[in-house]
Image (cartoon, rainbow, N blue to C red):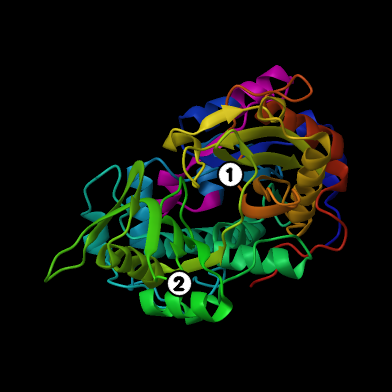
Amino acid sequence: MMHPDHLDADPHLIPLLLIAHAEGERTDGLRQARRSLGLPQPFVVPYERLLAGTPLAEAAAEAGLPAGSVPLIRLDAPGEHFAVERALIALGSPEHDDGDELLPLRGRRDPYRFSRRAALALQEQPVRLMHPSQWFRGFCRLLARLSREAAQAWPQALFWNDPAEIAIMFDKRACHRRLKEAGVSVPALLAEPEKLTGYEAVRTAMSERRMHRVFLKLAFGSAASGVIAYQINPRTGEERATTSLRAEVYVQRPGVFYNAKQVRTLTDSEDIRTLIGYLCGHGLHAERWIPKLSVGDRPLDLRQLVAFGEAGHCVVRAGQTPITNLHLRSQRLTPEEAGITQASLTAARREALAAMTAFPASASAGIDVLIDRNGERPYIADVNPFGDLLRRVSHDGLDPYAWEMSRWMTHRSNFPLPGIIQGGTQV
């Protein structure tokens, strides 16, 4: 696409349209960052307003966006808000039979789908995984709608992160494929997703590949929801599954699955079968278990923020288990505190930057990087389009949001990269 002329203007004159929760740590952090840089406040369009059916242009006008202006549109995370979660599940219901053009692997059928009415009747249960595949279908439908409505209202408008690329980043299966095709270092895939139909299929693939230790991940989970570190002893057949995923199983209705936010190791085959079957039903990504670099006996990984072709803030997460998310009692460290060598840190940052180039119509992401303890080779584990909520860390004297905004002010005339077609490439 041609470079939009309005991006050459004074950055103080380019309005930021923020699609987010009206209040919350992320929205407040972005407001404060722009205030600290002397930039005008964003015009905030709440997810709830859009999911109630309000067109994007109308919601933007309600938020105060001046008529005739061309905004930069930034989407923030839709999570941690039950009314929004419920509305997205409803949007993904069978009554809606279109709008799936941004849904990766859209030929798959979601299990036990809620009708729109049943979805809207759901009551909040904070740790329960309500219906992850239907939620993701609804989220992709919203992304597709926002992309269409933005193009109609503001033909020259750009998204901070392109909706089509957000959909790919969010789906671990599609993201892994995109990264591998771009030559980025990623853990080896156990099998193509369509082959992993259940517990027996996973075990068969592990035997055939001689891959006896794998990470099994819900394709669109976050906060370690639906992650299992799974291993089989090739000699004895003994199996172990380390996870925060729990299940309540019933005879005559679907089970209830939830993220207990406390990791335990299971050895009972029926318990493990139930959990793996759930992941396979909604969408499973399975990859080789990389033996992580550790500090003491605590395995670690990195969350590396990348924006506009630069590597910024970096947080080390050192876990008590193979799953290193901070809310699972993992320790938060700087790379220096973790003892990571400069060579390893440089390699990890280089790989994170390479991962971001696989999404050329997007400005920033939080990249999760594993470092193999055998040779210290970096691997990209995840690309989070909303991975910039990094507390109590600075880079160049700026918090993550202020740093991103400062990079925008410097690099806006080169965004998006030349030759990129708005809307991304569907996987």
Question: Number of marks in the image?
Answer: 2
Badge 2 crowding class, 10 Å Cα cut-off, few under 14, some 14 to 19, many 20 or more, is: few
Q: Position of residue 84 (x, y in %)?
A: 38, 47
Asked if residue 352 lies in the magenta stretch, the reply is no
Above or below residue 180? Residue 207 is below
**Mark 1 vs 2, N-terminal side:** 2
Q: Which residue is mark 2?
A: 235
- Write the residue at 86% across / 59% down: 2
- Write the residue at 49% across / 46% down: 323
Q: Position of residue 330 (x, y in %)?
A: 49, 34
Asked if residue 36 lies in the magenta stretch, the reply is yes
Q: Amino acid at mark 2?
A: Arg
Circle 2 — which element?
A: loop
Above or below residue 421? Residue 44 is above
Left or right, 353 with respect to 284, comes to: right
- Report the Cα–Cα distance between label 1 and label 2: 42 Å
Residue 386's tag is: 1
Q: Position of residue 291 (x, y in %)?
A: 61, 52
Q: Amino acid at mark 1?
A: Phe
